[in-house]
Image: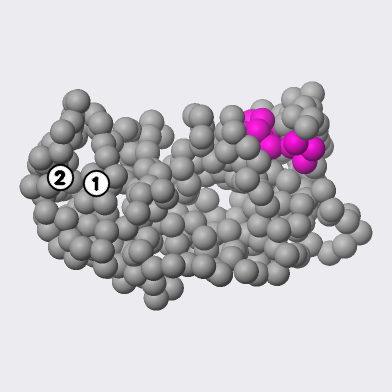
Amino acid sequence: MEGSEEEDDDDGEEGGESEEGEDDDDDEDNQSSSSTDSNTEPRYTPEQLAAIILDFYTFFTKLHFKPSDLKLPPPGGWPNLTRENVGPNFKSDYTLSVLRQLPYLNKEGLVEYNCSVQDYSTRTRESFELDEYGHLHGEDIYTHDYDDRDAPIPDHIVSFAPGYSSGGIELMLNVHDGTIIAEMIRYSHIGEEDIQRYFDSIKKKFRKLRLIPRMGRKTLDAEKVPERSRGIRLEAVRNQIRDNTWDSSNLDLQYLRQVYRDYGWPRAFRREEFEANLDRVLVEMGLSPDWWERSGL
């Protein structure tokens, strides 16, 4: 399949254009959670955080998730997320009130590279038990003191999207400061950013296919793969010298971007039609249909 590689992006940019200056926002968005003052009011209310996260999840249901994957809380919030059910030691009452109001996905959806979102709405009391360091399952990466990885995690910070495998992204939610804390597993602490700003940056990566998703498969990291200014012919992709059908190149990922856009990505993505034809496209490219690793989620 051949076609233009231009992208009709929500931010008005086309692939390959400079984004210099897009991150020149106030420094306050990047303040560390260690500076949190327990006497100050939370930056966002539970309802505001829920609205921001709902917008984030709704974005994905228009792309590589189904609308039926989205779960909204009943009036009064999720009934399992009460102090009586989670026990006395799980986080602060404010953190619990936030989790009770949040939307969730009914499967572990990939929202970053090797990163799947938490669903607290189905947890039992046993799953809220903390270890001796105050860690909940999925919180074994982040600590507010990066030099002391066994330090207890503050009560206002909770796992949002655990990462897996080397290089996977781990996301923590700071409900007091209204920030997302990101880490790359086995590599480094990435930083902390206002939740709205962080989610906007992720959405932009997906729109521009710097992160390439597929239902039931791992998200491909193509951030270092440059855009092509001209369309790519299938023949050029197929005629690459390959050691086997499992290896991929920058040209493969650039062609995949082109295929996605031919199917209307991101604004009018014809998901079912795309999924029905993608394995055939991979074979035509010279790749195995199983080259795209299943997520296992």
- Check disc 1 and report the residue beneath it: 251
On-image quarter of the N terminus = bottom left
Identify the residue at image location x=37%, y=43%: 220
Identify the residue at image location x=87%, y=62%: 40
Identify the residue at image location x=42%, y=50%: 223
- Kind of residue sitting beneath label 2: Val
Q: Does residue 288 lie above or below 10 as drawn?
A: above
Identify the residue at image location x=59%, y=29%: 186
Asked if marks 2 and 1 touch (Cβ < 8 Å), the reply is yes
Q: Residue 37, located in which quarter of the rendered image?
A: bottom right
Residue placed most toward the observer, 38 or 286: 286
- Kind of residue sitting beneath label 1: Leu
Judged left or right of residue 97, residue 183 is: left
Q: Residues within 10 Å of mark 2 (few under 14, many from 20)?
A: some
The spot of residue 79 in percent (x, y) is 63, 48
| Secondary structure of residue under mark 2 | helix
The spot of residue 28 in percent (x, y) is 75, 65
Q: Earlier in the sequence, mark 2 or mark 1?
A: 2
Examine the residues drawn in magenta and state their main secondary structure.
Answer: loop
The magenta span reads 136-146
Is residue 166 among what the camera can see?
A: yes
On-image quarter of the C terminus = top left
Residue extending farthest to the right is 39
- Check disc 2 and report the residue beneath it: 237
| Secondary structure of residue under mark 1 | helix
The spot of residue 294 in percent (x, y) is 33, 33
Q: Residue 48, located in which quarter of the rendered image?
A: bottom right
